[in-house]
Amino acid sequence: MPSREIAGKMVEVDAEGFLLNPDDWTKEIAEEIAREEGIEQLTELHWKVIEFCRADFKARGEPPTLRRITKESGVDTKTLYTLFPKGPAKKVARIAGLGKPTGCI
Amino acid sequence: MSEEKQRKLAIICSKGSLDMAYPGMVLANAALMSGIEVHMFFTFWGLDMIVDRKMDHLKITPLGNPSMGMPNLISILPGMTAMATSMMKKEIAKLDFPPVREFLQTIVDAGGHLYGCKMSMDMMKLTKDDLFPGVERVLGAMEFMEISEGAQIIFI
């Protein structure tokens, strides 16, 4: 598996750039991946989603589906698609340092 | 991300039974989650999915459905359709998939476009007022051709 430097830290990533080890994640890494995904500045609402995903992953062992995020984090579908435009599922997971989502919802 | 050509999906929903409603919605939602533009066209029985007074009451019947493994002679008994429907709704909820109305609203909120088929609506004496409010407009088949230009098309 390839390694790359993100925000000054060497981390292992898969072919699509998802972190292999969620524990490697830092806020600086999130900011840099967000910029790669076209999100210049992570706002408070972005962080609310990211932190929910990280906490949920810790509790349940899998990245939350978008449905779970909209049901549980207090950020609704419209807002989620505005925060992470053009394909929020992968973007949220990548920025939150979690694996590629496999859920269908 | 480079400005490559936007991938686009057009889904034609022509069936009004509960089991046939979900494939279109699941694919539409998956496409939106992946950043793909989505257009859903509801025609003929598929209109039931977006007719406001019907969309919450879609059913599945075991009659004539070999996949459900119930003998037709039993499937004709009163209450069998209701039973199969309630079982399927429970299974859908267990997987955390929303009911039809909520699912379509999610698709609309995610930027998906819903259209009713004009010809089918005329035949069934329906107007835009009979439809789920999330439906963008009523289209003829030719307009759908324009909207779906360059899209991958799925017919369900």
Image (cartoon, coloured by chain):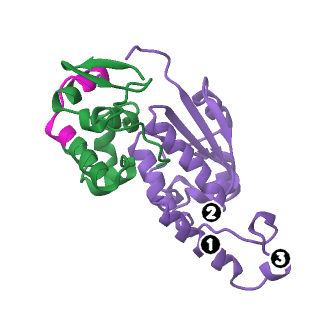
Q: Chain of mark 1?
A: B
Q: Which chain is purple?
A: B
Tell me where the magenta segment starts and ends, as one range.
A32-47
The residue positioned 38% from the left and 49% from the top of the image is A62
- Local packing at callout 3 (Cα closer than 10 Å; few below 14, some 14-19, many 20+) is few
Q: Label 2 sits on what residue type?
A: Leu
Q: Are marks 3 and 2 on the same chain?
A: yes
Query: Do residues under tags 3 and 2 come within 8 Å of each other at their CB atoms?
Result: no
Q: What secondary structure is marked by label 2?
A: helix
Whether B28 is drawn above or below B84: the answer is above
Q: Which residue is mark 2?
A: B18
Q: Which chain is green?
A: A
Query: Do residues under tags 2 and 1 come within 8 Å of each other at their CB atoms?
Result: yes
- Which numbered marker is on residue B85? 1
Q: Earlier in the sequence, mark 3 or mark 2?
A: 2
Q: Nearer the viewer, mark 3 or mark 2?
A: 3
Q: Are marks 2 and 1 on the same chain?
A: yes
Residue at mark 3 to residue at mark 1: CA–CA distance: 17 Å
The residue positioned 63% from the left and 30% from the top of the image is B152
Q: Earlier in the sequence, mark 3 or mark 1?
A: 3
- Local packing at callout 1 (Cα closer than 10 Å; few below 14, some 14-19, many 20+) is many
Whether B77 is drawn above or below B123: the answer is below
Inspect this view and state whether residue B126 appears: no
| Residue A84: image location, x then y, percent | 31, 34
Q: Which residue is mark 3?
A: B71
Q: Chain of mark 2?
A: B
Query: Do residues under tags 3 and 1 come within 8 Å of each other at their CB atoms?
Result: no
